[in-house]
Image (tube, rainbow, N blue to C red):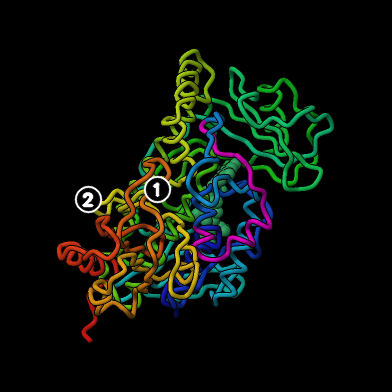
């Protein structure tokens, strides 16, 4: 028995498990594999993901294991995010296996229970919970939880068993991947437009396995059976066809395939079963977004599911998970489809590439695309009013009675924060009934304006309510220090508190 069972210990499942544990929820993660795979797919974290780790106080271990690099690009057209207002204006290059190891380490520190060789094979839900059937080393077993979250990847069994639809566009290309030894490697690594050819494109760069190369081939307008095994011969033939040589590949450590099928679930939730990460969306890995989207799903869902499980908020709060993540993910899938179109070799695609390359030269074009690709522009439509509403809170330095702190330090425990820069005690009274769930931090105002990626500078509000995922749920109007917060704004604050953190507790 657990409060929440998570199927899958990939990056999404592990991050979600950490978020739930931080809120005191009992979590069991079930993983089909007997041990962690050392065959990475993703190669890094975008800026917003690095911020998410910073919000939870674990960024240092990732920074020590990765390498900060200017990797944000749109179809391999470089985007300059160095001047974006964030403490992390870069991508952090590191292999997926390492990301998973660090998240697993954190999950275990927090008390997450993780079971290997436990494959979810069936499920049944009723009004009070979900029964999950697993098979593995100990035969078949049935486990029960209040909620089940499928973080079990693109071919999610949880999604299929729940009957959740997965509409989208089918594959139009065949992509093969191999970690192989090359007798005759290219003189320089191929990782960008230089690998584009008329019939597809290829990449050849150092793999995570010492001495090996990762070779990727993409053949346009060729759809193959996604379950057909990849052999060294198939990869070698594809590479020779596209690159003109197979670089003398041999001794494969790993061979795989992927495609540009692009799909998003028709609902993220069916009763007590939810989906997150690749289980909810798949797409071509252009510009390295999938793992990062999964982390954002986890951080959006974690605190909401925890509040529902603990009886603090009504189940309807979970509907905002679908609404908010759908909006961001649809935008990303669209962006990725556009990138894939530009990758093609045709006069039209070349023209499109030129147009985008010209647009990126303009600050606005670079900022717009840089905001999407770094995921720093993730925005949730929480309501109208102050321009900071729904945006990820900027990591201000603030002077509070307990000393100088950063806003992200206030979020380490994953609790909501009312950041009060009014210099008055009016808001303390407005928080009556929520002090068990919401932290009130009074600080001295420091700047007239706050800087956000993409939207730029906005007038500093006199107070903000920050959700545990770091997004702004309510903002008071900007006002001179010491002036009263208008009564309408205080009433808005109380309705935002009710909406996001449940009804006030009678004192
Ligand atoms: C070539 C390539 C390159 C990529 N590069 C990037 C990149 O640079 N950046 C990026 O952000 N993304 C990248 N991605 C995408 C990224 O790898 C995925 O988006 C990410 O792994 C999704 O994480 P997840 O936890 O949702 O799912 P997964 O990583 O697929 O994890 C699912 C887990 O569930 C387990 N599981 C499956 N079924 C069951 C079951 N029935 N019961 C129990 N456990 C189960 C699996 O064993 C697995 O451990 C790339 C993908 C590819 C193919």
For this orientation, the residue located farthest to the bottom is 507
Q: Which residue is mark 2?
A: 384
Depicted 292 relative to depicted 80: above or below: below
Q: Are dots 2 and 1 in contact, CB under 8 Å?
A: no
446 to the left or right of 216: left
Q: Earlier in the sequence, mark 2 or mark 1?
A: 1
For residue 372: magenta? no
Does ligand 1 reach within 8 Å of label 2's beta carbon? no
Query: Is any part of residue 41 visible from this angle?
Result: no
Residue depicted at 73% across the width and 32% down the height: 189
For this orientation, the residue located farthest to the top is 347
Query: Is any part of residue 230 visible from this angle?
Result: yes
Q: Nearer the viewer, residue 400 or 498?
A: 400
Q: Nearer the viewer, residue 364 or 195?
A: 364
212 to the left or right of 60: right
Depicted 379 relative to depicted 201: above or below: below
**Which corner quadrant holds the N terminus?**
bottom left
Circle number at residue 502: none
Count neighbours of disc 2 (C-alpha within 10 A) and say few if under 14, some if 14 to 19, many if 20 or more: few
Residue depicted at 47% across the width and 21% down the height: 358
Label 1 secondary element: loop
Specify start and end residues of the magenta stretch as a single range: 52-74
| Image x and y of residue 233, in percent | 72, 33
Q: Quadrant of residue 69?
A: top right
Q: Nearer the viewer, residue 237 or 35?
A: 35
For residue 63: magenta? yes
| Image x and y of residue 97, in percent | 65, 55
| Image x and y of residue 259, in percent | 52, 37
| Image x and y of residue 242, in percent | 66, 22
For this orientation, the residue located farthest to the right is 183
Q: Which residue is mark 1?
A: 378
* Alpha carbons under labels 2 and 1: distance apart: 16 Å
């Amino acid at each position: 028995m657990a409060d929440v069972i998570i199927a899958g210990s990939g990056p999404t499942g592990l991050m979600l498990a950490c978020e739930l544990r931080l809120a005191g929820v009992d979590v069991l993660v079930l993983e089909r594999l007997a041990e962690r795979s050392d065959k990475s797919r993703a190669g890094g974290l975008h800026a917003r993901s690095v911020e998410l780790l910073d919000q939870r106080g674990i960024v240092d271990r990732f920074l020590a294991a990765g390498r900060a690099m200017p990797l944000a690009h749109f179809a391999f057209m470089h985007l300059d995010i160095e001047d974006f207002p964030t403490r992390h204006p870069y991508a952090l290059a590191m292999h997926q296996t390492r990301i998973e190891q660090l998240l697993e380490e954190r999950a275990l520190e927090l008390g997450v229970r993780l079971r290997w060789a436990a494959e979810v094979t069936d499920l049944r839900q009723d009004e009070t919970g979900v029964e999950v059937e697993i098979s593995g080393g100990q035969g078949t077993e049935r486990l029960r939880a209040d909620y089940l979250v499928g973080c079990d990847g693109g071919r999610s069994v949880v999604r299929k068993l729940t009957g959740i639809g997965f509409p989208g566009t089918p594959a139009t290309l065949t992509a093969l991947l191999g970690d192989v030894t090359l007798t005759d490697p290219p003189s320089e690594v191929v990782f960008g437009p230089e690998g584009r050819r008329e019939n597809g494109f290829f990449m050849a760069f150092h793999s995570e396995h010492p001495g090996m190369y990762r070779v990727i081939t993409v053949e346009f307008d060729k759809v193959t059976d996604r379950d057909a095994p990849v052999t060294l011969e198939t990869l070698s033939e594809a590479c020779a066809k596209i690159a003109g040589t197979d670089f003398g590949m041999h001794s494969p450590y790993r061979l795989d395939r992927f495609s540009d099928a692009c799909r998003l679930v028709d609902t993220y939730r069916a009763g007590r079963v939810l989906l997150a990460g690749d289980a909810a969306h798949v797409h071509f890995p252009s510009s390295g977004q999938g793992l990062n989207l999964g982390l954002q799903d986890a951080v959006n869902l974690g605190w909401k599911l925890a509040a529902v499980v603990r009886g603090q908020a009504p189940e309807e709060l979970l509907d905002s998970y679908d609404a908010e993540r759908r909006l961001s993910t649809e935008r990303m899938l669209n962006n990725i489809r556009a990138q894939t179109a530009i990758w093609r070799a045709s006069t039209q695609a070349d023209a499109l590439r030129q147009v985008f390359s010209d647009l990126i030269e303009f600050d606005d074009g670079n900022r717009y695309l840089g905001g999407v690709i770094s995921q720093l522009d993730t925005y949730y439509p929480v309501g109208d009013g102050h321009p900071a509403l729904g945006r990820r809170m900027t990591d201000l330095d603030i002077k509070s009675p307990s000393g100088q702190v950063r806003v992200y330090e206030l979020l380490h425990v994953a609790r909501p924060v009312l950041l009060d820069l009014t210099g008055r005690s009016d808001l303390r009274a407005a928080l009556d009934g929520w002090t068990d769930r919401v932290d009130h931090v009074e600080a001295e105002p420091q700047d007239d304006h706050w800087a956000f990626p993409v939207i730029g500078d906005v007038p500093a509000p006199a107070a903000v309510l920050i959700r545990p995922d770091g997004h702004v749920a309510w903002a008071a109007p900007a006002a001179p220090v010491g002036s009263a917060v208008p009564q309408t704004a205080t009433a808005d604050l109380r309705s935002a508190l009710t909406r996001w953190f449940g009804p006030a507790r009678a004192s």
